[in-house]
Image (spheres, rainbow, N blue to C red):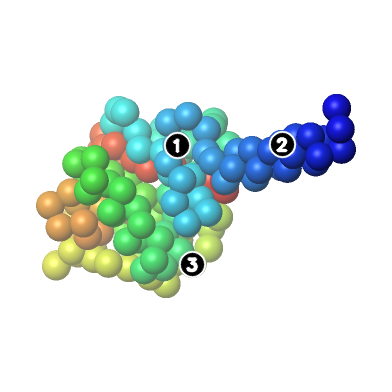
Amino acid sequence: MDSAKIVTLFLMISFFKAVASRNCEDGWEHQNGRCYYFSRFSTNFVASMYFCKRFEGALVEIEGPNEYETVVSLARARNFPDFYIGLTDIFSEGNWMQASSYKSQTYFRWSPGEPNNKRNQDCVQVYRANSKMDDVWCTENLHFVCEKGS
Ligand SMILES: [Ca+2]
Ligand SMILES: [Ca+2]
């Protein structure tokens, strides 16, 4: 092999490695440097957290308006039903925390009249109807979205 061919081969390997590193595993969608998984089934909040963790991810934690828009756009595109996000006030009523990182949440997009803590609702779903947040009982069976780094 002459040196030009070796250089070409090297460049091709570098290129494919770069492409591969930006991709997500099968079943996960790449968007803005993160990988998102949209569940094929519904379950309660704790089980959905456990499922995401089992695949080295976390129940999606919304860092701000950009990530929220990314997640709801992906959900709308697939006509995804109501789903859990990793947000809870189970430890202290009205004190919303990200469920895996325990970071205090500062960004919300509540549906009108929510959160109402109706008979003690401590977990959060995003409605399909208006792509907004609502506090729900953590025992409800819902679809969910996981995230992890790409
Ligand atoms: Ca609550
Ligand atoms: Ca509610």
Residue kind at label 3, given as amino acid type: Ser
Vertical relation: 27 (above or below) 112: above
Task: Name the residue located 28 percent from the left edge and 54 percent from the top edge.
Answer: 73
Residue kind at label 1, given as amino acid type: Trp
Find disc 2 in the rendering and name its residue: 13
Q: Earlier in the sequence, mark 2 or mark 3?
A: 2
Q: CA distance from mark 2 to mark 3?
A: 43 Å
Q: Residues within 10 Å of mark 2 (few under 14, many from 20)?
A: few
Classify mark 3: helix, strand or loop.
loop
Q: Earlier in the sequence, mark 1 or mark 2?
A: 2
Q: Are marks 1 and 2 in contact (CB under 8 Å)?
A: no
Task: Name the residue located 49 percent from the left edge and 67 percent from the top edge.
Answer: 104
Q: Quadrant of the N terminus?
A: top right
Residue 28 got which mark? 1
Residue kind at label 2, given as amino acid type: Ile
Find disc 3 in the rendering and name its residue: 104
